[in-house]
């Protein structure tokens, strides 16, 4: 039998086109398994210099001029992942919030899926996604086609989940959804924050900060509207289909849109802000932990993964309704409270990527040993 370090390993990602929480998990997997091949539907190499020199296998979507608009291909993506040939691998680790979990493997191959959520636009947030505008002029076409497609896509997604040998959930919140929609148990291992990236000088700033891709469910509109009335400085990092609408909503001259920034520039904004706003409901949400790694408190909507990372009164405060008024009230309460940057950073350090990598490696080693035991166990008729 092969030793663990001799295993031929494949890492599978939904897509690698921009840097978010799911993509940072892939980068950590790549460090844990330095000889692993990486499979993904589409790949933007310039966004991931860490993968230079690594073998990255892409699908036929890579040749499409619309390859970075993966939202356009919901009916195609299942076949994309089923087309990958993973027969030669002993271990497959997928990082999935969409179709990556649906790859086909042989019985002797162990497939461990790190699940960020059962696909939100099929299951928990389907109706919300249907209301959002994310693809500009193509939105009416997508919304017309989606209801007739989604039933078949849900069936495929449910079958795809059955192909996974072991699920890891990125939060207790996600573990509950895996149980509800896939009827599978999972082990919770929280995703990593690059703690070292935020260890510059943390200064007591005067502005509030929003960070992320600007799409509807992120609810940056709540923050913009709240700060129209508060008259306090607000900076927004990120681009996306909501930007034009957000700029129209912004009536305060103290609201500033910074666009897309590099990781280093974003880290500097974290270090200089007064607090980070988190008005959305996420399956986990890495932004609050990045804020805490910089020693900054978080004002978060009381839902989803934030309930597992934000400690009321110690690392931030919550607001209970996704409305400008509720957020504005929370900001006013926040202005009357003081927080300790050292306590906040100590909390975030528990989620550092070194801890994540150690947990994942130990978990995978244990699962591989159990997998070998199952393979070598005598069958009932032997």
Image (cartoon, grey):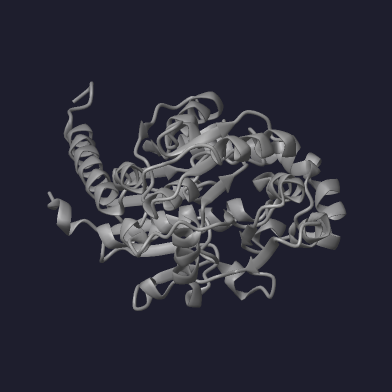
**The furthest residue to the front:** 336
Residue 28 versus residue 257: which sits nearer the camera? 257
Question: Residue 331 at x, y = what percent?
Answer: 61, 40
Residue 207 versus residue 245: which sits nearer the camera? 207
Seen at 30% across and 53% down, the residue is 353
Where, quadrant-wise, is the C terminus in this rendering? top left
Seen at 61% across and 67% down, the residue is 61
Q: Would you say 109 lies left or right of 285 here?
A: left
Seen at 66% across and 34% down, the residue is 329
**The furthest residue to the top:** 380
Question: Residue 187 at x, y = what percent?
Answer: 35, 32
Q: Would you say 341 lies left or right of 218 here?
A: left
Q: Would you say 246 lies left or right of 258 here?
A: right
- Answer above or below: position of 90 versus 187: below
- Answer above or below: position of 303 versus 49: above
Residue 301 versus residue 32: which sits nearer the camera? 301
Question: Residue 133 at x, y = what percent?
Answer: 79, 52
**In which quarter of the view is residue 253 placed?**
bottom right
Q: Would you say 357 lies left or right of 320 here?
A: left
- Answer above or below: position of 11 versus 361: below
Taking the image as drawn, is residue 108 in sight?
no
Question: Residue 243 at x, y = what percent?
Answer: 74, 61
Taking the image as drawn, is residue 132 in sight?
yes
Seen at 16% across and 51% down, the residue is 4
How many numbered discs, if any? 0
């Amino acid at each position: 039998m092969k030793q663990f370090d001799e295993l031929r390993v494949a890492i599978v990602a939904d897509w690698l086109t921009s840097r978010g929480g799911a993509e940072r998990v892939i980068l950590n997997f790549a460090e844990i398994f330095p000889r692993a091949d990486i499979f993904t539907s589409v790949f933007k190499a310039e966004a991931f210099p860490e993968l230079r020199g690594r073998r990255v296998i892409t699908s036929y979507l890579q040749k499409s001029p619309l390859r970075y608009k993966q939202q356009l291909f919901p009916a195609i993506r299942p076949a994309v992942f089923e087309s990958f040939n993973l027969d030669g691998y002993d271990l497959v680790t997928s990082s999935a919030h969409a179709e990556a979990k649906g790859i086909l493997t042989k019985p002797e191959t162990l497939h461990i899926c790190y699940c960020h959520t059962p696909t939100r636009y099929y299951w928990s947030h389907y109706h919300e996604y249907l209301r959002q505008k994310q693809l500009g002029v193509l939105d009416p076409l997508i919304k017309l086609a989606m209801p007739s497609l989604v039933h078949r896509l849900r069936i495929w997604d449910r079958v795809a989940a059955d192909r996974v040998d072991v699920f890891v959930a990125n939060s207790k919140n996600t573990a509950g959804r895996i149980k509800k929609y896939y009827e599978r148990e999972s082990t919770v291992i929280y995703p990593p924050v690059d703690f070292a990236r935020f260890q510059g000088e943390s200064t007591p700033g005067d502005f509030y900060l929003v960070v992320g891709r600007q799409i509807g469910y992120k609810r940056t509109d709540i923050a913009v509207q709240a700060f129209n009335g508060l008259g306090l400085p607000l900076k927004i990092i990120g681009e996306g289909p909501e930007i034009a609408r957000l700029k129209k909503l912004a009536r305060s001259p103290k609201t500033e849109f910074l666009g897309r920034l590099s990781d280093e520039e974003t880290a500097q904004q974290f270090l200089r802000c007064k607090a980070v706003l988190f008005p959305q409901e996420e399956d986990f949400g890495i932004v609050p932990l990045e804020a805490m790694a910089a020693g900054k408190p978080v004002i978060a909507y009381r839902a989803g993964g934030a309930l597992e990372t934000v400690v009321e009164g110690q690392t931030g405060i919550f607001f209970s309704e996704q409305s400008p008024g509720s957020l504005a009230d929370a900001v006013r309460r926040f202005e009357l409270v003081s927080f300790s940057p050292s306590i906040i950073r100590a909390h975030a350090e528990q989620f550092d990527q070194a801890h994540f990598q150690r947990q994942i490696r130990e978990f995978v080693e244990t699962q591989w040993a159990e997998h070998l035991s199952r393979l070598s166990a005598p069958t009932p008729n032997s």
